[in-house]
Amino acid sequence: MMNSKRMLVLGIVVGFILGGALSVFASSVIQAILNDQVKVLLNGEVQTFVDETTGEMQYPITYKDRTYLPLRNIANLVGLEIDYDAETNSVLLGKNEKTIKELTPSKKYDMDHIECAPDAGNASEYYYEDLGDAVWVGFGNSYSASSYLQEGDKKYEAINLRSVLDMDNCWAEGVAGSGIGETITVKAFGSSEHVSWHGGDQDNHDDVIKFLLNDYNDVVEEATSNSHNKNQLPPKITSANIDNYSNNMKSIAIINGYAKNEETFKNNNRVKKFKLTINNDDEYILDLEDFMGVQVFDLEYSCKLSKPIELKFEILEVYKGEKYDDTCVTMLYVDGSSDNPWYPYGGR
């Protein structure tokens, strides 16, 4: 055998064919040759293949007198989309329609059952509850929108969506018509193994990370110093270990329409359907009820703690208002807690 050929024992041929970025699921053991003597030419030019994950060279393999090429590299070479569906063990070539899951509210609270924490939304305030080693800190999510309505000095901006303390405000789209296609984007910080965010004044990802790496550890110690858990402090968060933790979303709460009162609610449009896209990938349809109160959608998602969970809400359909053609949302809140979600929305 030539020195340039190396013998391999592979769990399954297709694992190598797909390229190192995809998972290998062993079903049988084969003996094959990693054959760097085989050249691949496209329009007369020799092509080389590199593993997208490791940066290592990828070579054809020879098995039972047949030559197999790394499929991902070949697909990229000819401009063919390729992906892998781990749930179904399927290689996806070409354009594949995503399955979009529809969600309906798992629970609702009418306006009479919403109780606001005295210092909710103030990042300088925090409180400790008997929830294991969880420390609840006043953090805010970052809000933006494709448009907003302005009437005189009053601005119905996206930032209004983060507060339940002032029902006089809401977000309203600012384009002609019902606002179909207008979007709200939230960069969210839900919770981690020892951290949870509920409102606050950190308005961007960099400020939140700066807080976690500097002031957060002092907040943890002070908040737990007089509790029965004072000897069970969670590990300090540092730049070295921050990505050992995850940023978790458990659910989303929405107060639809302009919920200042029954009149403003009925007079203005309310969202009937949102298309939700998470981190430019996963997609959902949220079916909102024509209801003045909190609607909770159970939806779990995780990424590294150092990164926000970016949620983009696109208006697909609306409930028409009796007087105005402005589509409004009063609150949009992302929660990461799993034991007692939706404080202060009834029953903490």
Image: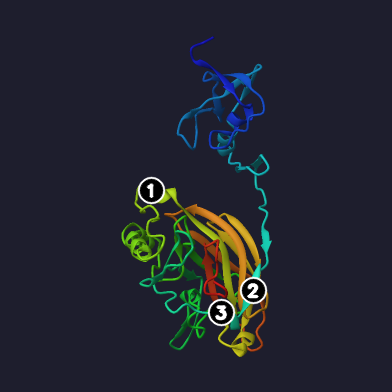
The answer to whether one can see residue 76 in this image is yes
Against 80, is 68 above or below?
Answer: above
Element under disc 2:
strand
**Of callouts 1 and 3, the N-terminal one:** 3
Judge by depth and name the residue closer to the eye, 187 or 218: 218
For this view, does 304 lie left or right of residue 114?
A: left
Residue found at x 52% / y 54%: 302
Find the distance from the CA under tag 1 to the CA under tag 3: 37 Å
Q: Name the residue nearer the viewer: 23 or 231.
A: 231
Q: What number is the disc on residue 108?
A: 2
Q: Which residue is mark 3?
A: 114
Labels 2 & 3 near each other (Cβ < 8 A): no
Q: Quadrant of the N terminus?
A: top right
- 222 relative position to 112: left or right: left
Name the kind of residue labelled 2 in the image. Lys
Q: Quadrant of the C terminus?
A: bottom right
List the residue tagged with mark 1: 241
256 or 225: which is nearer to us? 225
Label 3 amino acid? Ile
Could you say where residue 252 lies in the image, as x and y percent from the top left?
A: 57, 66
Q: Which of pointers 2 and 1 lies earlier in the amino acid sequence?
A: 2
Point out residue 18 in the picture as x, y percentages from the top left corner. 59, 34
Tell me if residue 327 can be seen.
Answer: no
Residue extending furthest toward the front:
228
| Residue 212: image location, x then y, percent | 36, 59
